[in-house]
Amino acid sequence: KNLELPTTFVPGELFGQPGETVAAQFGQEYQYTAGVTVNKSLIDLSNRLSIKERNKDIDIVASDNAIYREYLIGHINYSYHALLLAEEAQQLAQEDIQVADSVLRITQSKFDEGFLDLGALNRSKVNFNRVKQDLDEAVLVYEDSQKTLKEALGIAHHKTLSITEKLRLNRFEVPTTESLGENLEMLKSEQQTEKAALGLKQARSEYYPKISLTSYFGSQLFQDEFDFSLNHENWSPVQYASLSVNVPIFNGFSTRRKVKIAKLDAEVSELNFKQEKDRLEAEDALLLKNQNLTASMALTSLENYQLHKEIVALEFSKYTEGLVGLEIYLNAFEDYLNAKSAYLNALTTYYQYSAKVYSRS
Protein backbone atom coordinates (compact mmCIF):
# COMPACT_ATOMS: atom_id res chain seq x y z
CA LYS A 1 0.00 0.00 0.00
CA ASN A 2 1.34 3.39 -0.98
CA LEU A 3 0.78 5.59 2.05
CA GLU A 4 1.72 8.65 0.01
CA LEU A 5 2.36 8.83 -3.70
CA PRO A 6 5.49 10.64 -4.87
CA THR A 7 5.05 14.22 -6.10
CA THR A 8 6.25 15.15 -9.57
CA PHE A 9 6.32 18.66 -11.03
CA VAL A 10 4.99 18.74 -14.61
CA PRO A 11 4.17 21.48 -17.14
CA GLY A 12 0.78 23.09 -16.52
CA GLU A 13 -0.20 22.61 -20.18
CA LEU A 14 -1.07 19.03 -19.27
CA PHE A 15 -3.79 20.32 -16.94
CA GLY A 16 -4.94 23.37 -18.91
CA GLN A 17 -2.73 25.76 -16.96
CA PRO A 18 -0.22 27.04 -19.51
CA GLY A 19 2.85 28.84 -18.25
CA GLU A 20 2.67 27.18 -14.82
CA THR A 21 4.24 24.20 -13.12
CA VAL A 22 1.85 21.82 -11.44
CA ALA A 23 2.71 19.41 -8.59
CA ALA A 24 1.10 16.11 -9.51
CA GLN A 25 0.99 12.65 -7.96
CA PHE A 26 0.92 9.66 -10.23
CA GLY A 27 0.20 6.07 -9.24
CA GLN A 28 -2.34 3.91 -7.54
CA GLU A 29 -2.95 3.19 -3.87
CA TYR A 30 -2.03 -0.49 -3.91
CA GLN A 31 1.07 -1.98 -5.51
CA TYR A 32 2.13 -5.66 -5.70
CA THR A 33 5.60 -6.76 -6.70
CA ALA A 34 6.91 -10.26 -7.48
CA GLY A 35 10.37 -11.00 -8.79
CA VAL A 36 13.86 -12.40 -8.36
CA THR A 37 16.95 -10.43 -7.38
CA VAL A 38 20.35 -11.80 -8.42
CA ASN A 39 23.49 -10.44 -6.78
CA LYS A 40 26.96 -11.15 -8.13
CA SER A 41 30.14 -10.07 -6.40
CA LEU A 42 32.62 -9.15 -9.12
CA ILE A 43 35.51 -7.95 -7.00
CA ASP A 44 35.62 -8.62 -3.23
CA LEU A 45 39.17 -9.41 -2.20
CA SER A 46 38.28 -9.50 1.49
CA ASN A 47 35.75 -12.27 0.97
CA ARG A 48 38.11 -14.31 -1.21
CA LEU A 49 40.88 -14.09 1.38
CA SER A 50 38.45 -15.10 4.13
CA ILE A 51 37.58 -18.22 2.14
CA LYS A 52 41.28 -19.02 1.73
CA GLU A 53 41.77 -18.59 5.48
CA ARG A 54 38.95 -21.02 6.23
CA ASN A 55 40.41 -23.52 3.77
CA LYS A 56 43.78 -23.16 5.50
CA ASP A 57 42.05 -23.92 8.82
CA ILE A 58 40.74 -27.12 7.25
CA ASP A 59 44.28 -28.01 6.16
CA ILE A 60 45.59 -27.43 9.69
CA VAL A 61 42.89 -29.66 11.18
CA ALA A 62 43.78 -32.34 8.60
CA SER A 63 47.43 -32.05 9.64
CA ASP A 64 46.46 -32.46 13.31
CA ASN A 65 44.59 -35.64 12.43
CA ALA A 66 47.56 -36.92 10.43
CA ILE A 67 49.94 -36.14 13.32
CA TYR A 68 47.74 -38.08 15.73
CA ARG A 69 47.51 -40.97 13.27
CA GLU A 70 51.31 -41.00 12.99
CA TYR A 71 51.62 -41.04 16.79
CA LEU A 72 49.09 -43.87 17.02
CA ILE A 73 50.98 -45.96 14.46
CA GLY A 74 54.24 -45.51 16.38
CA HIS A 75 52.50 -46.24 19.68
CA ILE A 76 50.99 -49.46 18.34
CA ASN A 77 54.28 -50.52 16.77
CA TYR A 78 56.20 -50.06 20.02
CA SER A 79 53.50 -51.73 22.15
CA TYR A 80 53.46 -54.67 19.74
CA HIS A 81 57.22 -55.24 19.94
CA ALA A 82 57.20 -54.65 23.71
CA LEU A 83 54.59 -57.40 23.96
CA LEU A 84 56.69 -59.81 21.89
CA LEU A 85 59.81 -58.89 23.86
CA ALA A 86 58.07 -59.44 27.19
CA GLU A 87 56.79 -62.82 26.00
CA GLU A 88 60.31 -63.93 25.11
CA ALA A 89 61.64 -62.51 28.37
CA GLN A 90 59.14 -64.69 30.23
CA GLN A 91 60.35 -67.75 28.35
CA LEU A 92 63.99 -66.98 29.16
CA ALA A 93 63.18 -66.31 32.81
CA GLN A 94 61.33 -69.62 33.08
CA GLU A 95 64.35 -71.45 31.67
CA ASP A 96 66.70 -69.55 33.98
CA ILE A 97 64.56 -70.20 37.04
CA GLN A 98 64.78 -73.94 36.42
CA VAL A 99 68.57 -73.70 36.34
CA ALA A 100 68.66 -71.43 39.40
CA ASP A 101 66.36 -73.82 41.25
CA SER A 102 68.61 -76.78 40.41
CA VAL A 103 71.67 -74.90 41.63
CA LEU A 104 69.85 -73.88 44.80
CA ARG A 105 68.87 -77.49 45.50
CA ILE A 106 72.45 -78.69 44.98
CA THR A 107 73.81 -75.86 47.12
CA GLN A 108 71.25 -76.56 49.87
CA SER A 109 72.21 -80.24 49.85
CA LYS A 110 75.93 -79.49 50.09
CA PHE A 111 75.27 -76.90 52.79
CA ASP A 112 73.32 -79.47 54.83
CA GLU A 113 76.23 -81.90 54.40
CA GLY A 114 78.64 -79.24 55.61
CA PHE A 115 80.57 -78.83 52.35
CA LEU A 116 79.44 -75.18 51.79
CA ASP A 117 79.02 -72.23 54.08
CA LEU A 118 75.99 -69.97 54.58
CA GLY A 119 77.38 -67.30 52.24
CA ALA A 120 77.34 -69.66 49.27
CA LEU A 121 73.81 -70.74 50.08
CA ASN A 122 72.63 -67.14 50.35
CA ARG A 123 74.19 -66.26 46.98
CA SER A 124 72.30 -69.14 45.38
CA LYS A 125 69.08 -67.88 46.95
CA VAL A 126 69.80 -64.33 45.74
CA ASN A 127 70.28 -65.57 42.18
CA PHE A 128 67.09 -67.60 42.36
CA ASN A 129 65.15 -64.60 43.69
CA ARG A 130 66.62 -62.37 41.02
CA VAL A 131 65.49 -64.70 38.23
CA LYS A 132 62.05 -64.96 39.83
CA GLN A 133 61.92 -61.18 39.98
CA ASP A 134 62.85 -61.01 36.27
CA LEU A 135 59.99 -63.39 35.52
CA ASP A 136 57.49 -61.33 37.51
CA GLU A 137 58.68 -58.15 35.78
CA ALA A 138 58.35 -59.76 32.34
CA VAL A 139 54.78 -60.87 33.17
CA LEU A 140 53.96 -57.34 34.35
CA VAL A 141 55.34 -55.77 31.16
CA TYR A 142 53.50 -58.35 29.06
CA GLU A 143 50.14 -57.65 30.70
CA ASP A 144 50.66 -53.88 30.48
CA SER A 145 51.70 -54.06 26.81
CA GLN A 146 48.72 -56.25 25.97
CA LYS A 147 46.35 -53.80 27.69
CA THR A 148 47.92 -50.84 25.86
CA LEU A 149 47.77 -52.64 22.51
CA LYS A 150 44.11 -53.57 22.99
CA GLU A 151 43.21 -49.96 23.79
CA ALA A 152 45.09 -48.66 20.75
CA LEU A 153 43.44 -51.21 18.44
CA GLY A 154 39.98 -50.72 19.95
CA ILE A 155 39.75 -54.30 21.26
CA ALA A 156 37.62 -54.92 24.35
CA HIS A 157 39.62 -55.91 27.44
CA HIS A 158 37.61 -59.10 28.00
CA LYS A 159 38.54 -60.38 24.53
CA THR A 160 41.67 -62.39 23.86
CA LEU A 161 44.49 -60.87 21.82
CA SER A 162 46.27 -63.66 19.98
CA ILE A 163 49.63 -63.00 18.28
CA THR A 164 51.31 -65.80 16.37
CA GLU A 165 54.57 -63.99 15.59
CA LYS A 166 57.52 -64.73 17.82
CA LEU A 167 60.50 -62.50 18.50
CA ARG A 168 63.72 -64.40 17.95
CA LEU A 169 66.12 -63.01 20.51
CA ASN A 170 69.06 -64.97 19.12
CA ARG A 171 68.83 -62.95 15.88
CA PHE A 172 68.77 -59.23 15.26
CA GLU A 173 68.87 -57.46 11.90
CA VAL A 174 70.31 -54.00 11.44
CA PRO A 175 67.72 -51.53 10.00
CA THR A 176 68.26 -50.09 6.53
CA THR A 177 66.18 -46.91 6.90
CA GLU A 178 68.12 -43.95 5.50
CA SER A 179 65.40 -41.32 5.22
CA LEU A 180 62.13 -40.32 6.84
CA GLY A 181 58.79 -39.38 5.37
CA GLU A 182 57.35 -35.88 5.45
CA ASN A 183 57.49 -34.21 8.86
CA LEU A 184 53.83 -33.45 9.56
CA GLU A 185 54.60 -31.09 12.43
CA MET A 186 56.72 -29.00 10.07
CA LEU A 187 53.89 -29.05 7.52
CA LYS A 188 51.43 -27.83 10.16
CA SER A 189 53.80 -25.04 11.23
CA GLU A 190 54.14 -23.96 7.59
CA GLN A 191 50.35 -23.96 7.18
CA GLN A 192 49.98 -21.78 10.28
CA THR A 193 52.50 -19.33 8.81
CA GLU A 194 50.58 -19.23 5.54
CA LYS A 195 47.36 -18.58 7.43
CA ALA A 196 48.97 -15.67 9.29
CA ALA A 197 50.12 -14.21 5.95
CA LEU A 198 46.56 -14.53 4.62
CA GLY A 199 45.30 -12.82 7.77
CA LEU A 200 47.54 -9.84 7.02
CA LYS A 201 46.30 -9.66 3.42
CA GLN A 202 42.71 -9.94 4.61
CA ALA A 203 43.18 -7.08 7.08
CA ARG A 204 44.70 -4.87 4.37
CA SER A 205 41.90 -5.75 1.94
CA GLU A 206 39.50 -3.62 4.01
CA TYR A 207 41.03 -0.62 2.21
CA TYR A 208 40.28 -2.02 -1.27
CA PRO A 209 37.09 -1.25 -3.28
CA LYS A 210 34.30 -3.79 -3.80
CA ILE A 211 32.36 -4.13 -7.04
CA SER A 212 29.06 -6.01 -7.31
CA LEU A 213 26.35 -6.49 -9.93
CA THR A 214 22.62 -6.63 -9.11
CA SER A 215 19.91 -7.78 -11.54
CA TYR A 216 16.15 -7.80 -10.96
CA PHE A 217 13.53 -9.72 -12.95
CA GLY A 218 9.90 -9.36 -11.96
CA SER A 219 6.43 -7.87 -12.44
CA GLN A 220 4.26 -5.22 -10.82
CA LEU A 221 0.52 -4.94 -10.25
CA PHE A 222 -1.18 -1.61 -9.44
CA GLN A 223 -4.71 -1.43 -7.98
CA ASP A 224 -6.90 1.38 -6.65
CA GLU A 225 -8.57 -1.03 -4.26
CA PHE A 226 -7.31 -3.80 -2.00
CA ASP A 227 -7.72 -6.48 -4.59
CA PHE A 228 -5.29 -9.10 -5.94
CA SER A 229 -5.32 -10.55 -9.42
CA LEU A 230 -3.48 -13.53 -10.90
CA ASN A 231 -4.28 -12.52 -14.45
CA HIS A 232 -0.93 -12.03 -16.16
CA GLU A 233 -2.42 -9.30 -18.37
CA ASN A 234 -2.78 -7.07 -15.32
CA TRP A 235 0.89 -7.40 -14.41
CA SER A 236 3.62 -5.19 -15.91
CA PRO A 237 7.13 -6.59 -16.38
CA VAL A 238 10.00 -4.88 -14.58
CA GLN A 239 13.70 -5.53 -15.22
CA TYR A 240 16.80 -3.64 -14.28
CA ALA A 241 20.51 -4.10 -13.59
CA SER A 242 22.84 -2.04 -11.45
CA LEU A 243 26.58 -1.94 -10.91
CA SER A 244 27.70 -1.05 -7.40
CA VAL A 245 31.19 0.23 -6.58
CA ASN A 246 32.01 0.68 -2.89
CA VAL A 247 35.18 2.61 -2.21
CA PRO A 248 36.12 2.94 1.48
CA ILE A 249 37.03 6.54 2.31
CA PHE A 250 37.50 6.26 6.05
CA ASN A 251 37.29 2.96 7.89
CA GLY A 252 38.07 4.32 11.30
CA PHE A 253 41.10 3.43 13.39
CA SER A 254 39.99 -0.14 14.06
CA THR A 255 41.07 -1.32 10.59
CA ARG A 256 44.46 0.27 11.07
CA ARG A 257 44.88 -1.56 14.40
CA LYS A 258 43.81 -4.82 12.77
CA VAL A 259 46.49 -4.41 10.11
CA LYS A 260 49.16 -3.75 12.74
CA ILE A 261 48.13 -6.80 14.78
CA ALA A 262 47.94 -9.02 11.69
CA LYS A 263 51.38 -7.83 10.55
CA LEU A 264 52.86 -8.63 13.96
CA ASP A 265 51.21 -12.08 13.96
CA ALA A 266 52.61 -12.80 10.49
CA GLU A 267 56.13 -11.79 11.51
CA VAL A 268 56.00 -13.86 14.72
CA SER A 269 54.58 -16.83 12.83
CA GLU A 270 57.33 -16.64 10.21
CA LEU A 271 60.01 -16.50 12.91
CA ASN A 272 58.44 -19.43 14.78
CA PHE A 273 58.32 -21.47 11.57
CA LYS A 274 62.03 -20.93 10.89
CA GLN A 275 62.92 -21.97 14.45
CA GLU A 276 60.55 -24.94 14.31
CA LYS A 277 61.98 -26.03 10.98
CA ASP A 278 65.55 -25.99 12.30
CA ARG A 279 64.50 -27.89 15.43
CA LEU A 280 62.52 -30.55 13.58
CA GLU A 281 65.23 -31.11 10.96
CA ALA A 282 67.76 -31.60 13.76
CA GLU A 283 65.38 -34.02 15.53
CA ASP A 284 64.87 -36.03 12.33
CA ALA A 285 68.61 -36.37 11.80
CA LEU A 286 69.07 -37.35 15.44
CA LEU A 287 66.23 -39.89 15.21
CA LEU A 288 67.90 -41.81 12.39
CA LYS A 289 71.27 -41.56 14.14
CA ASN A 290 69.84 -42.85 17.42
CA GLN A 291 68.10 -45.73 15.66
CA ASN A 292 71.41 -46.80 14.11
CA LEU A 293 73.27 -46.37 17.40
CA THR A 294 70.73 -48.38 19.42
CA ALA A 295 70.75 -51.06 16.71
CA SER A 296 74.53 -51.28 17.05
CA MET A 297 74.19 -51.46 20.83
CA ALA A 298 71.62 -54.26 20.48
CA LEU A 299 73.97 -56.23 18.21
CA THR A 300 76.84 -55.88 20.68
CA SER A 301 74.57 -56.81 23.58
CA LEU A 302 73.32 -59.84 21.64
CA GLU A 303 76.85 -61.06 21.10
CA ASN A 304 77.69 -60.62 24.78
CA TYR A 305 74.47 -62.36 25.79
CA GLN A 306 75.21 -65.36 23.57
CA LEU A 307 78.79 -65.60 24.86
CA HIS A 308 77.73 -65.48 28.50
CA LYS A 309 75.00 -68.03 27.81
CA GLU A 310 77.64 -70.45 26.52
CA ILE A 311 79.96 -69.66 29.42
CA VAL A 312 77.33 -70.25 32.11
CA ALA A 313 76.26 -73.52 30.49
CA LEU A 314 79.88 -74.68 30.49
CA GLU A 315 80.48 -73.59 34.09
CA PHE A 316 77.28 -75.32 35.22
CA SER A 317 78.45 -78.56 33.62
CA LYS A 318 81.82 -78.20 35.35
CA TYR A 319 80.16 -77.44 38.67
CA THR A 320 77.85 -80.47 38.56
CA GLU A 321 80.89 -82.61 37.77
CA GLY A 322 82.84 -81.09 40.63
CA LEU A 323 85.49 -79.52 38.41
CA VAL A 324 84.91 -75.94 39.63
CA GLY A 325 83.59 -74.44 42.81
CA LEU A 326 80.17 -72.89 43.34
CA GLU A 327 81.57 -69.37 43.47
CA ILE A 328 82.94 -69.63 39.93
CA TYR A 329 79.59 -70.81 38.61
CA LEU A 330 77.61 -68.19 40.52
CA ASN A 331 79.87 -65.45 39.15
CA ALA A 332 79.29 -66.77 35.62
CA PHE A 333 75.55 -66.98 36.23
CA GLU A 334 75.40 -63.39 37.53
CA ASP A 335 77.37 -62.20 34.50
CA TYR A 336 74.90 -64.06 32.29
CA LEU A 337 71.91 -62.40 34.00
CA ASN A 338 73.54 -58.98 33.61
CA ALA A 339 74.22 -59.63 29.91
CA LYS A 340 70.64 -60.80 29.36
CA SER A 341 69.25 -57.73 31.13
CA ALA A 342 71.52 -55.44 29.10
CA TYR A 343 70.38 -57.08 25.86
CA LEU A 344 66.68 -56.79 26.70
CA ASN A 345 67.14 -53.16 27.72
CA ALA A 346 69.03 -52.44 24.47
CA LEU A 347 66.21 -53.99 22.45
CA THR A 348 63.61 -51.95 24.36
CA THR A 349 65.50 -48.74 23.62
CA TYR A 350 65.92 -49.70 19.98
CA TYR A 351 62.21 -50.41 19.51
CA GLN A 352 61.36 -46.99 20.97
CA TYR A 353 63.30 -45.27 18.18
CA SER A 354 62.33 -47.86 15.58
CA ALA A 355 58.62 -47.26 16.25
CA LYS A 356 59.04 -43.54 15.58
CA VAL A 357 60.91 -44.21 12.36
CA TYR A 358 58.28 -46.75 11.29
CA SER A 359 55.48 -44.22 11.83
CA ARG A 360 57.30 -41.80 9.49
CA SER A 361 57.87 -44.30 6.70
Image: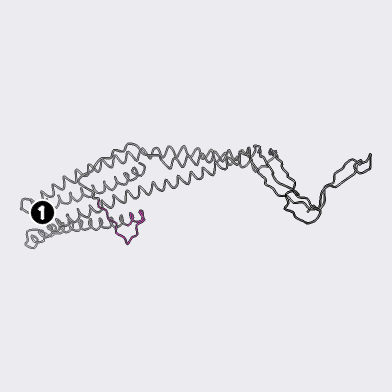
- Tell me residue 283's x, y (percent): 38, 40
Q: Residue 279: which quarter of the image? A: top left
Judged left or right of residue 47, residue 182 is left
Whether 180 is drawn above or below 133: the answer is above
What element does badge 1 sit on? helix
Which of 245/243 is in front? 243
**Residue 263 occupies quadrant:** top right
Question: Which three-letter amino acid code belongs to the residue tagged 1?
Answer: Leu
The C terminus sits in image quarter:
top left
Q: Dividing the picture into quarters, in which one does residue 307 lie?
A: top left
Give the main secondary structure of the magenta stretch: loop
Question: Residue at the spot x=56%, y=42% of the render?
Answer: 51
Image location of residue 315, percent across then percent down? 10, 49
Q: Is residue 40 left or right of residue 144?
A: right
Q: Where 43 sits versus 105, above or below? A: above
Q: Nearer the viewer, residue 190 or 272?
A: 190
Q: Position of residue 88 (x, y in %)?
A: 22, 52
User: In the image, 293: left or right of 27?
Assistant: left
- Tell me residue 125's x, y (percent): 16, 59
Magenta run includes residue 231: no
Q: Is residue 34 left or right of residue 111?
A: right
Q: Is residue 152 magenta?
A: yes
The quarter in which the N terminus is drawn is bottom right
Q: Camera-side residue: 52 or 300?
A: 52
Dot 1, crowdedness within 10 Å: few (<14), some or many (≥20)?
many
Instruction: Write down the residue under mark 1.
Output: 326
Which segment did they paint magenta?
A: 147-164
